[in-house]
């Protein structure tokens, strides 16, 4: 490839064509608010015939019984929903998504139990766009609901409307997650924003993603909400800006104050009843509203549905790769520093995103080495923190994930850790303990500055992890106690069975003994009658026969004689004396 400096080119500069534009948006060239205004001031034409109404540019659908519709009618609904999310206002309401309010009340009680348990260890919690204490939030409520009450979970998520709506935008094989948000009276509104994926980045991070990826991101997820309480306008239901999902530079724009002010001027809110649903494109500008009611706790189960395509073709054990290549990377860093070649290797063996690790894992030794920037920083700081020939990748009292300024909107979930010295800990992980030769002086590194809010989120997440550990131990203890009780019950049943068998055996033996005695008596009487002798003569002859060793009239064993004796005592029969 030839250089273009000094007018040099590859010889094809004579073509009359515009220059190739940049692939990236730039923070230095912010989007135009006028373009945004023009896009979001249009109205919905009447081409959604299946909608019951269109209010404030938001189509509203009244859902009948699912099985009352034919496959063709369901497909027609999906066609309209797809058009709304892609080219239309970007949001629609589904009335009566859940008709059984008693089910929602049951699920609400499950959510209340989960929140109470988490508050015992985590205190006040917020979300990523509102302050702590303004609401109650359950992260990953899908999993927690299932583990807490699988029966109501199975009923709740057996709703066939959910996959029908999701497939309209994402196609089959999607993955649903959920978070519960309960906004209390007096809670302030969220700032306007776009959602996951790129919506969780700051502007400097956003501008690194090509324009096509920024547009494509919205096609990988669908946002939804199920109203678990009544949501009149004064309770602050979600604020929406129809058509804003079509603004290509939206991820670069929503943090700009002028765009935030325009959102506050033009947003609309849709009141919802318990059981209603709201679904929208993740690129739509939106925000939870301010709860001005006196006593309404606005409760919603927030659904985030992800495309099946957001996964690599093969599974990669990133941690194992980091372990095996750490020696080589550490050696390369000592020779070349954090070179482009080393960065290339890190990008292959390390994970590229904090999500979902930051919300579902709190393994403070694993997460940092699965993320590009943190792993690169570990190489740099590990060089400065060798002690007793052992690499300590992160200095004492340093947070082990992205600093808040790199990812301000994401609740962190790992702890601030003081690494132990080799004398304190001889069981360190191989990936964290690499011999580097003779000890050297440790350079002093200033601790990473954390905002109180970020530090609070870190602490509460770790406390939640401790609570999960306690819950796991409690479940294990309960299981062991239950098994112990089962063993005791089984042993008692076995002993009872043996006692019953012995009792039956004794009864059978007594019955056989009585029958035998009666048989002996019958045989004695028969012999006496045949001989024509009286009872005294029969007794004398029998005694003489025993004394002389002659032939006995009736062979009687010792046990039989004892039985005869007992019978004699009972009946006082002189013939058996």
Image (spheres, rainbow, N blue to C red):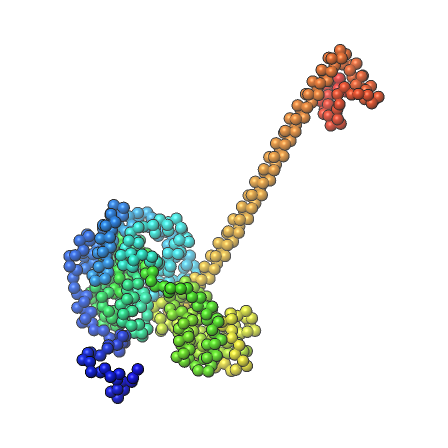
Question: In which quadrant of the rendered view does residue 248 lie?
Answer: bottom left
> Is 554 displayed left or right of 388 in the figure?
right
45 vs 313, nearest the viewer: 313
Residue 544 drawn above or below residue 316: above
Q: Residue at position x 41%, y 64% from top?
A: 315
Residue 419 drawn above or below residue 170: below
> Is 562 displayed left or right of 134 in the figure?
right
Q: Report the quarter where the N terminus lies.
A: bottom left
Report if residue 535 is visible in the image: yes
424 vs 248, nearest the viewer: 248
Percent x, y of residue 286: 26, 64
How many numbered marks have been drawn onto this rendered protein structure?
Answer: 0
Q: Residue at position x 32%, y 65% from top?
A: 196
Percent x, y of residue 292: 26, 60
Residue 312 drawn above or below residue 435: above
Extreme-right residue of the structure: 548
Q: Report the quarter where the C terminus lies.
A: top right
Percent x, y of residue 432: 49, 72
Q: Residue at position x 18%, y 68% from top?
A: 37
Q: Residue at position x 69%, y 18% from top?
A: 522
Report if residue 297 is visible in the image: no
Question: In which quadrant of the rendered view does residue 526 lie?
Answer: top right
> Is 64 displayed left or right of 570 in the figure?
left
Extreme-top residue of the structure: 532
Percent x, y of residue 128: 34, 65
Question: In which quadrant of the rendered view does residue 199 lie?
Answer: bottom left
Extreme-front residue of the structure: 11
């Amino acid at each position: 490839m030839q250089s273009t400096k000094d007018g040099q080119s590859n010889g094809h500069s004579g073509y009359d064509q515009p220059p190739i534009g940049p692939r990236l948006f730039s923070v230095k060239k912010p989007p135009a608010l006028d373009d945004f205004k023009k896009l979001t001031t249009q109205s919905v034409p009447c081409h959604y015939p299946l909608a019951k109404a269109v209010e404030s540019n938001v189509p509203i659908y009244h859902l009948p019984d699912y099985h009352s519709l034919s496959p063709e009618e369901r497909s027609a609904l999906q066609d309209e929903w797809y058009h709304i999310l892609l080219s239309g206002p970007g949001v629609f309401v589904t009335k009566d998504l859940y008709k059984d309010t008693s089910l929602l009340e049951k699920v609400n009680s499950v959510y209340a139990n989960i929140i109470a348990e988490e508050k015992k260890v985590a205190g006040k919690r917020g979300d990523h766009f509102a302050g702590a204490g303004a609401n109650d939030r359950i992260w990953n409520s899908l999993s927690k609901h299932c583990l807490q009450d699988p029966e109501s979970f199975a009923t709740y998520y057996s709703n066939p409307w959910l996959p029908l709506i999701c497939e309209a935008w994402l196609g089959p094989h999607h993955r649903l997650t959920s978070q519960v948000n309960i906004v209390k009276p007096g809670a302030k509104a969220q700032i306007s924003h776009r959602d996951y994926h790129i919506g969780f980045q700051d502007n400097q991070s956003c501008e690194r993603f090509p324009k096509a990826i920024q547009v494509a991101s919205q096609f990988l997820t669908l946002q939804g909400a199920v109203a678990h309480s009544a949501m009149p306008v004064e309770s602050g239901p979600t604020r929406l800006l129809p058509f804003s999902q079509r603004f290509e530079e939206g991820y670069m724009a929503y943090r700009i104050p002028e765009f935030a002010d325009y959102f506050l001027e033009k947003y609309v809110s849709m009141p919802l009843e318990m059981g209603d649903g709201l679904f929208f494109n993740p690129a739509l500008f939106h925000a939870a509203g301010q709860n001005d009611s006196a006593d309404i706790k606005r409760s919603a189960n927030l659904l985030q549905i992800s495309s099946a395509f957001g996964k690599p073709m093969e599974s990669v054990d990133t941690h194992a790769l980091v372990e095996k290549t750490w020696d080589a990377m550490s050696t390369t860093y000592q020779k070349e520093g954090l070179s482009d070649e080393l960065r290339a290797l890190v990008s292959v063996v390390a994970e590229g995103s904090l999500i979902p690790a930051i919300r579902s894992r709190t393994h403070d030794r694993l997460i940092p080495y699965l993320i590009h920037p943190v792993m690169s920083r570990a190489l740099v700081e590990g060089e400065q923190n060798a002690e007793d020939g052992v690499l300590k990748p992160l200095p004492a009292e340093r947070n082990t994930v992205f600093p808040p300024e790199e990812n301000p909107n994401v609740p962190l979930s790992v702890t601030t850790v003081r690494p132990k010295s080799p004398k304190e800990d001889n069981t360190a992980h191989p990936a964290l303990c690499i011999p580097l030769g003779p000890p050297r002086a440790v350079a002093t590194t200033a601790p990473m500055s954390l905002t109180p809010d970020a530090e609070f989120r870190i602490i509460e997440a770790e406390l939640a992890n401790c609570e999960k550990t306690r819950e796991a131990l409690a479940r294990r203890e309960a299981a062991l106690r239950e098994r112990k009780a089962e063993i005791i019950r089984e042993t008692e049943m076995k002993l009872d069975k043996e006692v019953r068998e012995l009792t039956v055996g004794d009864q059978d033996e007594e019955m056989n003994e009585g029958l035998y005695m009666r048989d002996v008596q019958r045989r004695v009487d028969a012999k006496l009658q045949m001989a024509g002798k009286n009872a005294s003569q029969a007794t004398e002859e029998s005694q003489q026969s025993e004394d002389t060793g002659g032939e006995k009239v009736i062979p009687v064993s010792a046990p039989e004689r004892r039985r005869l004796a007992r019978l004699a005592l009972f009946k006082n029969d002189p013939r058996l004396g």
